[in-house]
Amino acid sequence: MRIGVLALQGAFAEHIKKLDELDVESFEIRQLGDIKKPFDGLILPGGESTVMGKLLRDLELLEPLKALICDGMPVFGTCAGLLLLAKDFSGEGTPVFSSMDIKARRNAYGRQLGSFCANADFLGVGNIQMTFIRAPYIESAGADVTVLSETGGHIVAATQGKQLVTAFHPELNEGHGIHKYFLEELR
Ligand code: GLN
């Protein structure tokens, strides 16, 4: 199994470290040439979704990656990665891959609560600690979307087909539960 991690910007190294710890082969996606060889899954890390969207366009990675996602390649988006996959936004935000039937609220917790931790249940994984950094949440989700976790009255993790999104950063916390959940989806 080979996982491509979008490495244009943001917290990609932490995802690669989690995959290393699970003995899963990964590689960085920085340019078009990096996705020429086949691979089995894609991780979109946290960072700044507007910057990643622009770089994806400039580097001509947007359309080929979108085609892979739409063809059913398993994809895991964390925080900014969630925003890259969202079809719709309440407030600011521009669709990028626009492949997942969720309405996201960008920078949903405002400046006062820029970063925080919470403990919440994640369906199929159990109670975990979640780190939120200028995070979005999912305001509403379509009928084909399964909600995996809610905290503070908001949806913070969901799945649709082979797409998995979390508003928080599992790559920054101890444990491998969420990465394992994603890898299970691939099998
Ligand atoms: N606020 C960022 C954005 O809008 C997301 C933050 C994150 O990925 N930690 O893209």
Image (cartoon, rainbow, N blue to C red):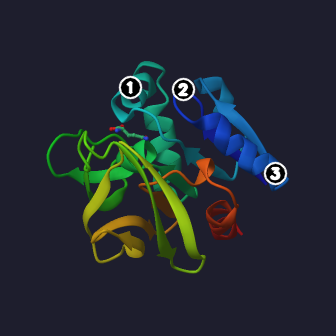
Q: Which residue is mark 1?
A: 51
Q: Residue furthest left?
A: 91
Q: Which residue is mark 3?
A: 21
Mark 1 belongs to which amino acid? Answer: Val
Left or right, 121 with respect to 156, comes to: right
Residue 72 position, x and y percent, is: 53, 60
- Structural distance between the alpha carbons of marks 1 and 3: 29 Å
Specify whether tag 1 is near ligand 1 (CB below 8 Å).
yes
Q: Which residue is mark 2?
A: 8
Instruction: Say which residue appears at 50% left-offset and 59% top-offset.
Output: 130
Residue 108 position, x and y percent, is: 25, 50
Say whether disc 1 or disc 2 marks the residue closer to the N-terminus: 2
Left or right, 44 with respect to 52, comes to: right
Say whether disc 2 or disc 3 marks the residue closer to the N-terminus: 2
Q: Dot 1: few (<14), some (14–19), or many (≥20) neighbours within 10 Å?
A: some
Instruction: Say which residue appears at 24% left-offset and 38% top-offset.
Output: 94
Instruction: Say which residue appears at 65% left-offset and 60% top-offset.
Output: 179
The vertical placement of 181 against 111, above or below, is: below
